[in-house]
Amino acid sequence: MQWKQINKNLSTGSTTAEIRSILIPDEYGNLKRHRVTTCWNPAEPKFSKTPATGKLAKDDSGKIGIMVYGKNNTYIKVGKFNSSIPYIVVAINCISKKPRKKLLKGVNIELVGEGNFVFGIEK
């Protein structure tokens, strides 16, 4: 798979999928589902009807997860949190099945579990 370097520690793939919700652990380690949408005005974070976008992302240690960002590289609004953020990287099992299948189709990676999370490693 071809990886595009976006910063010092993170590379992304080319295939994208629409992401409407992600699982984020709470303070007890339980995974909670949060809605995620594109935020068009970062100074005034509100939910929009436009879903976020996700890509495969690989860090410098070789772990592969999902980078969730706004449509057209804008900010995202996640659940009950008050601020908007440019992107968030989550484990592969933290998104729904349909976008997960779309992102992993034709990609040669091995899935590895660490606690409640599933990450990928390139073969």
Image: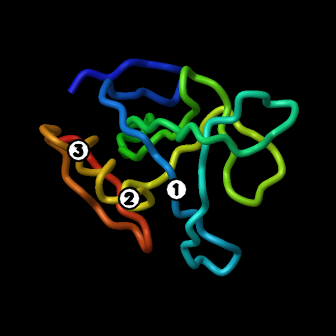
Q: Secondary structure at mark 2?
A: loop
Mark 3 vs mark 1: in front: 1
Q: Earlier in the sequence, mark 2 or mark 3?
A: 2
Q: What is the spatial separation of the Cα atoms under label 2 and label 1, in whole angstroms?
A: 7 Å
Residue 59 in picture, x, y percent from top left: 44, 37
Residue 47 vertical placement versus 114 (above, below): above
The amino acid beneath tag 1 is Ser
The residue where tag 1 is placed is 21
Which quadrant holds residue 115?
bottom left
Q: x, y percentage for residue 36?
A: 60, 49
Q: Residues within 10 Å of mark 3 (few under 14, many from 20)?
A: some
Q: CA distance from mark 3 to mark 1?
A: 18 Å
Residue sitting nearer the eye, 76 or 59: 76
Q: Quick check: 85 left or right of 115? A: right
Q: Which mark is residue 96?
A: 2
Q: Amino acid at mark 3?
A: Leu
Residue 46 position within the rendered picture, expressed as x and y whole percent measured from the top left: 77, 43
* Residue marked by disc 3: 104
